[in-house]
């Protein structure tokens, strides 16, 4: 799965920058930077991702491709860090950290605009069952 996602990232400029944006967002969340203190790199990756996804929207045959859906998924789940983080849950071994539940379970907020876009893309695509990229349907679910 990881190899397939990386290959997609190297062939789709927007997805490549979405991967970078996601990592920069996770780094921002783990360093507990105050909201609005985004790095120029994070802003650049976000802008390139949005621009490239919008380019693919111009063509109806590529608008809802798996790689475009993945890029929007990354944008949707890597919002600003929450100002009031939930209380720490008890340590649950390596599984929590390996699956990034410590970050996506409370450190990062979702972005409603991208969540709505993702839902519309999935609707146009015909639902999650029509996703071909391995692991993507499970990630969305």
Image: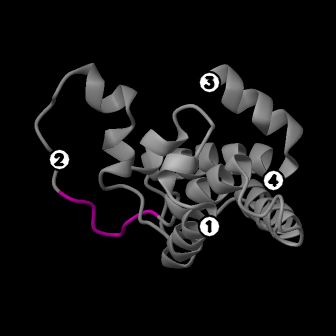
Q: Is residue 111 left or right of 15 when viewed as pictured? A: left
What range of the chain is rendered magenta?
81-86
- Rendered-image quadrant of the N terminus: top right
Residue in view at x 38 percent, y 26 percent: 98
Question: Element type at marker 2?
Answer: loop
Question: Element type at marker 4?
Answer: helix
Packing grade of label 1 (10 A; few <14, some 14-19, many >=20) is many
The answer to which of marks 4 and 1 sits earlier in the sequence is: 4
Percent coordinates x, y for residue 127 in the rendering: 51, 59
The residues tagged by marks 3 and 2 sit, at their Cα atoms, a distance apart of 29 Å
Q: Which residue, given by chain and number where applicable, does mark 1 sit on?
A: 121
Question: Element type at marker 1?
Answer: helix
The answer to which of marks 1 and 3 sits earlier in the sequence is: 3
Question: Residue 2 — which label?
Answer: 3
Residue in view at x 68 percent, y 21 percent: 3
Residue in view at x 51 percent, y 34 percent: 135
Q: Which residue, given by chain and number where applicable, does mark 4 sit on?
A: 14
Question: Residue 77 — which label?
Answer: none
Is the residue 76 above or below the residue 134 in the image? below
Which dot, 3 or 2, sits closer to the camera? 3
Say whether residue 120 is magenta: no
- Is any part of residue 31 visible from this angle? no
For the residue pair 87 and 17, the one nearer the viewer reads as 17
For the residue pair 41 and 68, the one nearer the viewer reads as 68
Percent coordinates x, y for residue 65 in the rendering: 73, 53
The answer to which of marks 4 and 2 sits earlier in the sequence is: 4
The answer to which of marks 4 and 3 sits earlier in the sequence is: 3
Which dot, 2 or 1, sits closer to the camera? 1
């Amino acid at each position: 799965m990881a190899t397939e996602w990386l290959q997609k990232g190297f062939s789709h400029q927007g997805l490549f920058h979405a991967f970078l944006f996601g990592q920069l967002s996770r780094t921002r969340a783990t360093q507990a930077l105050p909201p609005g203190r985004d790095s120029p790199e994070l802003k650049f990756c976000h802008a390139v991702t949005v621009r490239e996804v919008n380019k693919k929207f111009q063509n109806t045959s590529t608008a809802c491709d798996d790689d475009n859906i993945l890029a929007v998924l990354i944008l949707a789940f890597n919002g600003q860090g929450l100002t009031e983080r939930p209380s720490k849950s008890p340590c649950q071994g390596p599984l929590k950290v390996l699956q990034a539940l410590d970050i996506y379970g409370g450190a990062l907020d979702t972005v409603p605009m991208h969540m709505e876009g993702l839902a519309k893309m999935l609707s146009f695509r015909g639902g999650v069952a029509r996703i071909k990229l391995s692991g993507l349907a499970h990630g969305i679910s």
